Amino acid sequence: PSTSSIIKYLSIQHNELLSTTHPATMKFSSVALLGLAISSSAFTSPKLFHRRSQNVVGSLLQMSEATATKTESYEFQAEVGKVMDIIINSLYSDRDVFLRELVSNAADACDKKRFLSITAEESEGLSKPSIKVKCNPDENTISIEDSGVGMTRDELVNNLGRIAQSGTKAFVEALGEGTADVNLIGQFGVGFYSAYLVANKVEVFTKSMQSNSQAFKWESSAGNSFEISEVSDEEAAFETSGSRLVLHLKEDAAEYADFQKIEDLLNRYSEFVEFPISLWKEKTEYKKVPDVEANKDLPEGEEPKMKTVPETTTEYEQINNQKPIWLRTPKDCTEEEYNDFYKGAFRNSYDEPMKYSHFVLEGQVECKAVLFIPGMLPFELSKDMFDENSRNIRLYVKRVFINDKFEGLIPRWLKFVKGVVDSDDLPLNVSREILQKSKVLSIINKRLVRKSLDMIRDIAEDEDETKYITFWNNFGKYLKVGIIEDTKNSKEIEPLLRFFSTKSEEEYISLDQYVERMSEGQKSIYYVTGEGRENASMSPVLEKLTSRGYEVLFATEPLDEIMMESFRQYKDFDIVDASKETVKIDDDAETKKKNEEASEKLKDTMEYLQTTLSGKIQKVKVSNLLTDSPAALVQGAYGVSPTMQRYMKAQAVAAGADDSQLGGMNQAVLEINPDHPIILDLDSRIKAGQQEDNETEDFALLMYDVASMTSGYDIKDPKNFAKRVMTLMNKGEISGAVKDAEAVPASPPKEEENEEEEEEAVQAEVVE
């Protein structure tokens, strides 16, 4: 053969190898072809041999590059049985949700039928779609039937036979734009398989609304396969179209065959589904019938005697009678309707909301919501203000209840606010049980907080002041937590706080009211802590402030002290704890000089007190804040009040911790009044050299104990305190009064008086 024919043949073989042969074999064969080509060229001429060999080598290099860059695509494969096992056992945390998922699918089928019936030629004869649920304890089954759009054989295969194939989502995509009137729920294509949470076998009877459709039965036991068979219209039992799921329950799921259990779940998850949901349930009615036994001997003409007998019937009863008020326009709703919705949705028949807010959020996020402020503190929050089982905000997606335990939807300081939020934009996971953090959640959170604050402000500004007093008594502590935890909104909360004060008596005042009536020259807002208004009003540190006309707020709870530490300023005024040693009112040169002179004068007394009270106080100092009291206990700059100390110790004990480690929080400082007679008396004892006398020590300790009590501290040694008081009573003014009384001569008894009168006269000799 000619050289050209050889080359042509080799080229054909090369291309065939390139398309069919494994790369490694192809390279080996190409080398062989190259050798043949070169050999055949050698018979012609050396120049031709050289040129053709270069051409063949170039072709080989191009072929090698093409082989090296060639990629192949493969589809993921899944083991169906394993995927089903994951869906059944791992996707959902609560198997109660199976009913929510299946009823939602039924609602989607009804909504599809409603939408398609608008353009159907025979739409007048179509009945309104509905959903029916029936429990059969005898057969341990539950059936969920809808008169919706139904399914054909192909739809059964695609929608139920293909996991994660959402028929609802495909329906919406097929409609394209302009589908605002369609309220379809499904999107993930796995809700149907939640049936296997409680069932070991599922049967689906269905008939499509398409004309001349055949009824089918789909059946599977959650394995790797399913069966589809034709059934007669009599067996399918549909008037026009629809689907009926029959769940054969597992042994450990027999509770779901009880209609009362199913009724509770329907009320919880599907209460606001658009289409009527009816449950087959027993009803017991009491009727009056003639009493045959009692009427045997009844005389003629008398009215027969009656008896009441129970009559039990079974029938379908509609469950979802409540209307989703949040989907309506606020201007179309009345206050009575809001109150009825609140009582029905939150099962609060004994309570009426104090305030409500109905709003729609549009723009980046679409959301509809109704919020309520209860008229009284919910029972569950009276025990624990942050009770985890208190479900205040209920999240819905297209009328279907999703959850009421989501964190992040609303801050916990608004735990008392109840409401409903319905949004399609929330980032839910596939099981619709977990709310993922996202910008959408943040936007909804901000709007809920803003609307809640608006409601609270409206109550505060109401002409009837008793409304806000009621609100504050019920929920004031939550606003205090908001000051501590929500720094973004603390400025909005501060004007809503209320306090008792030295001037308000039994009425609350706001910080704005306090600022309005501040005395001339007052530079700070003052407060004192104490357990209750009465105890706080006994604090000796109030004396100098009140004598100048300054008003002092009472912080009567441990939470108050933490809150006050969280915001140190209000409208350019510092908020100051009057029980701290750092408080300064008269800070001029004259006052400083006077204090220095008093400290120098009482230097020995202060040293004696420092030694005697070692371990109880950090130091002793002269104070110009006291007028009537000899001494007071205050805290250092980093100390905490006695109320807070008791609270923290109680918390430590409850947690099983050692409360001795909390000793550092007590930084007590004893402030003494240099002009008080008791201090001057003690000073004279010290200067007289009576430091070692027990009486002097008891005198100093008793003064400290009294200062502790009036400053809000507990007496740690009540036994010795009582002993010192009794000693004072025996040696002080009381004993002197008794001696004076004994010195008064008694009148001589009269002879005519009897012995009893003499005894009375003797008893009367003691004069107080």
Image: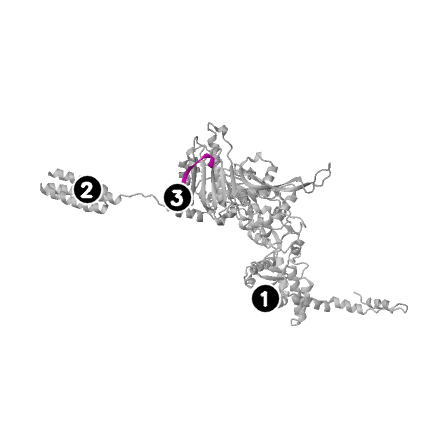
Cα distance between the residues tagged 1 and 2: 98 Å
Which is in the foreground here, disc 1 or disc 2? 2
Residue at the image position 64 percent from the left and 44 percent from the top: 467
As drawn, the label of residue 59 is: 2
- Secondary structure of the residue carrying tag 1 is loop
Quarter of the image that includes the C terminus: bottom right
- Secondary structure of the residue carrying tag 3 is loop
Q: Position of residue 484 (x, y in %)?
A: 55, 51
| Location of residue 235 with respect to 391 vertically, above or below | above
Q: Mark 1 points at which residue?
A: 615
Magenta stretch in the rendered image: 227-235
Quarter of the image that includes the N terminus: top left
- Secondary structure of the residue carrying tag 2 is helix
Cα distance between the residues tagged 2 and 3: 52 Å
Q: Name the residue under label 3.
A: 225
What amino acid is found at the position of numbered circle 3 in the picture?
Answer: Ser
Residue at the image position 13 percent from the left and 43 percent from the top: 38
What amino acid is found at the position of numbered circle 1 in the picture?
Answer: Gly
Q: Which of the marked residues, 3 or 1, is nearer the chain's N terminus?
A: 3
What amino acid is found at the position of numbered circle 2 in the picture?
Answer: Ser
Q: Which of the marked residues, 2 or 3, is nearer the chain's N terminus?
A: 2
Which is in the foreground here, disc 3 or disc 1? 3
The front one of 557 and 691 is 557
Which is in the foreground here, disc 2 or disc 3? 3
> From the viewer's perspective, is 551 left or right of 238?
right
